[in-house]
Image (spheres, rainbow, N blue to C red):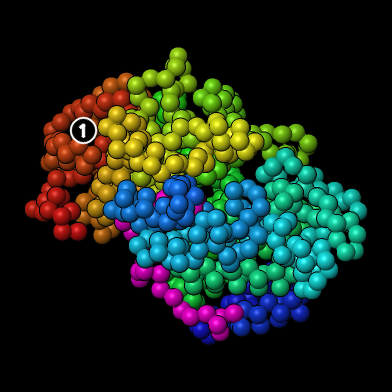
């Protein structure tokens, strides 16, 4: 135990609880928790570098008869991504009652339908892992809620009861379901808080015993080898009637407390906050470099999608040019797709409403759905688009149907994501170029199922083995791109970026900084037309006599006035030689 940080823990608790008794209960509980915890190193002695690339997947995305899904998942990883992906986010793999795992019944047990802890440990032998700490709520079917209803201590105050009919109109809602739901307890019918659904009952962090329970889960996940802890729906943690109940100071302080604890027991581990909210609100979870180590870059997915649909980088470039670099010892998790949909709140104030409405219309045309949220005035507005990212890029906003550029357009989207400062994350259904699963939606009745297909593993292997399938082309090209990216110090998450404005047809940036001998100039054509670009006018290009395109090995000289980019082509340009040292030799010895 790092004794020097104990006063800091008490300071966190004093900011969370305005009650000395609660502070002392939580503090003594944390002391006991730390006494049982062994310091753990998660595979490495540094936070991150350019070799980091993350895969997001459910534990049962791949199914093979007679085999546990976690075993099949490992087969997929070892066969297709072992040389490119080094970290795997296994979405909640615990017993659950709804929401595909995010309504947790038992936080410390592996769902027996998926496998067991030894199966997880087997994956952890080769890959870093990310676990979800589903911290805001627990399943209505959990033992905690059962004991609450039965009036058993200490669970009588584990959930948030609301008496009477207070004004809750200010509460920020990510759903259009009722905020308060009935619970039939030993003491009669109660109304309990349920931010997300009637099956996901919010925990009462005003009770320090609840905080201690979840901190024990956090420590358990680290013990089980989780390098990254994802704080699911963390923004809604603290509730105070009369406020919007999102991003409250107590919530931020709870995240700071968890970071302090992680630094004490697992200095290499990473705390990631999941806050699908407007951009500036999302960035607030960096704190003063004392809160989350990493935040999702939520604005990226809708902005890239919009840019490629319009063939216009204006809003994407403007946003990226104004993006503040992450604080010291912090970074972004960049992604274009996940198990959820493409969030629309993160582009509030970035994309005009007419552009959002146009994007929603186009996604409907491509077979997608839109989830709604409730607003304080009683109205509803779009919250997220439900569609696979591959299907979302099947055509553009003004096309008369599918064109021949779907794969190129999709690869361009991933190239943009990989170039930006941060760690790239790939949803498994992006890696496998999975189309919309309309059958899954019909089966479950949930629109998010469109992007949560469960592959028959033998069938997927046959598709990947086919020379003509888009599944085969995309997974081969993406894994090769990830491997190429991992060679270059310019793509280290700590390497600064400088966004260039080369006109609306292009998205371009420099990755260069101290300690990076070979910078990268990344240029992307966002249109279905061949584009001519005068590279000699790009500041810094003529500083080197020749350049190599890492994505095609073409050589360009600084005397080149113009270069041609094919539809949706990306170029990662690196000086061929600096101070007599060859870029290719430097890469081979990196």
Position above or below: 115 against 431: below
Q: Secondary structure at mark 1?
A: helix
Residue nearest the viewer, comparing 119 with 354: 119
Quadrant of the image occupied by residue 163: bottom right
Residue at 61% across / 36% down in the picture?
443
Where residue 280 sits in the image (x, y, percent)?
56, 48
- Segment tinted magenta in the rendering: 33-59
Q: Is residue 17 left or right of residue 489?
A: right
Question: Main SS type for the magenta part?
Answer: loop
Where residue 573 sits in the image (x, y, percent)?
22, 41
Residue 36 within the segment the image draws in magenta: yes
The residue tagged 1 is 536
Residue nearest the viewer, comparing 209 with 503: 209
Position above or below: 304 against 171: above
Q: Quadrant of the C terminus?
A: bottom left
Residue at 59% across / 55% down in the picture?
232
Residue at 69% across / 56% down in the picture?
139
């Amino acid at each position: 135990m790092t004794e020097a940080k104990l006063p800091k823990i008490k300071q966190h608790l004093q900011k969370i609880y305005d009650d000395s008794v609660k502070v002392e209960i939580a503090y003594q509980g944390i002391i006991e928790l730390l006494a049982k915890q062994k310091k753990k190193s998660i595979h490495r002695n540094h936070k991150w570098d350019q070799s980091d690339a993350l895969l997001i997947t459910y534990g049962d995305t791949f199914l093979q008869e007679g085999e546990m899904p976690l075993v099949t998942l490992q087969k997929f990883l070892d066969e297709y991504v072992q040389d490119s992906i080094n970290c795997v986010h296994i979405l909640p793999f615990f017993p659950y009652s709804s929401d595909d795992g995010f309504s947790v019944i038992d936080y410390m047990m592996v769902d027996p339908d998926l496998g067991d802890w030894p199966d997880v440990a087997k994956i952890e032998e080769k890959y870093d892992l990310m676990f979800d700490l589903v911290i805001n709520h627990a399943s209505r079917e959990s033992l905690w809620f059962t004991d609450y209803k039965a009036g058993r201590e200490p669970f009588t105050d584990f959930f948030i009861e609301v008496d009477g009919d207070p004004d809750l109109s200010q509460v920020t809602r990510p759903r259009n379901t009722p905020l308060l739901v009935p619970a039939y307890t030993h003491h009669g019918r109660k109304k309990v808080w349920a931010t997300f659904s009637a099956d996901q009952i919010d925990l009462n962090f005003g009770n320090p015993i609840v905080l201690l329970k979840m901190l024990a889960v956090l420590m358990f996940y680290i013990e089980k080898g989780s390098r990254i802890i994802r704080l699911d729906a963390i923004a809604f943690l603290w509730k105070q009637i009369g406020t919007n109940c999102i991003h409250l100071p107590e919530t931020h302080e709870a995240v700071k407390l968890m970071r302090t604890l992680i630094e004490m027991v697992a200095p290499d581990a990473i705390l990631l906050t999941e806050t699908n909210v407007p951009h500036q609100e999302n960035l607030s979870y960096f704190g003063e470099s004392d809160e989350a180590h990493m935040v999702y870059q939520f604005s990226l997915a809708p902005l890239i999608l919009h840019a490629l649909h319009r063939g216009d980088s204006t809003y994407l470039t403007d946003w990226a040019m104004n993006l503040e670099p992450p604080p010291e010892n912090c970074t972004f998790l960049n992604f274009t797709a996940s198990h959820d949909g493409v969030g629309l709140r993160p582009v509030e104030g970035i994309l005009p409403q007419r552009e959002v409405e146009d994007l929603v219309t186009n996604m409907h045309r491509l077979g997608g759905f839109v989830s709604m949220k409730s607003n304080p005035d009683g109205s509803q507005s779009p919250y997220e688009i439900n569609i696979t990212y591959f299907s979302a890029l099947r055509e553009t906003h003004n096309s008369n149907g599918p064109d021949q550029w779907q794969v190129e357009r999709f690869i361009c989207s991933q190239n943009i994501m990989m170039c930006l400062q941060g760690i790239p994350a790939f949803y498994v259904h992006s890696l496998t170029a999975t189309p919309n699963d309309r059958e899954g939606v019909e089966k479950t009745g949930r629109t998010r199922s469109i992007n949560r297909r469960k592959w028959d593993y033998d069938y997927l292997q046959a598709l990947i083995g086919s020379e003509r399938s888009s599944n085969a082309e995309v997974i081969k090209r993406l894994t090769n791109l990830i491997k190429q990216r991992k060679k270059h110090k310019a793509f280290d998450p700590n390497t600064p970026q400088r966004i260039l404005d080369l006109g609306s047809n292009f998205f371009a940036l420099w990755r260069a900084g101290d300690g990076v001998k070979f910078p990268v100039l990344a240029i992307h054509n966002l249109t279905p037309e061949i584009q001519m670009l005068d590279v000699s006018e790009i500041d810094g290009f003529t500083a080197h006599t020749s350049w190599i395109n890492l994505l095609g090995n073409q050589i360009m000289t600084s005397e080149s006035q113009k270069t041609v980019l094919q539809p949706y082509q990306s170029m990662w340009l690196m000086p061929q030689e600096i101070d007599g040292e060859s870029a290719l030799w430097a890469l081979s010895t990196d």
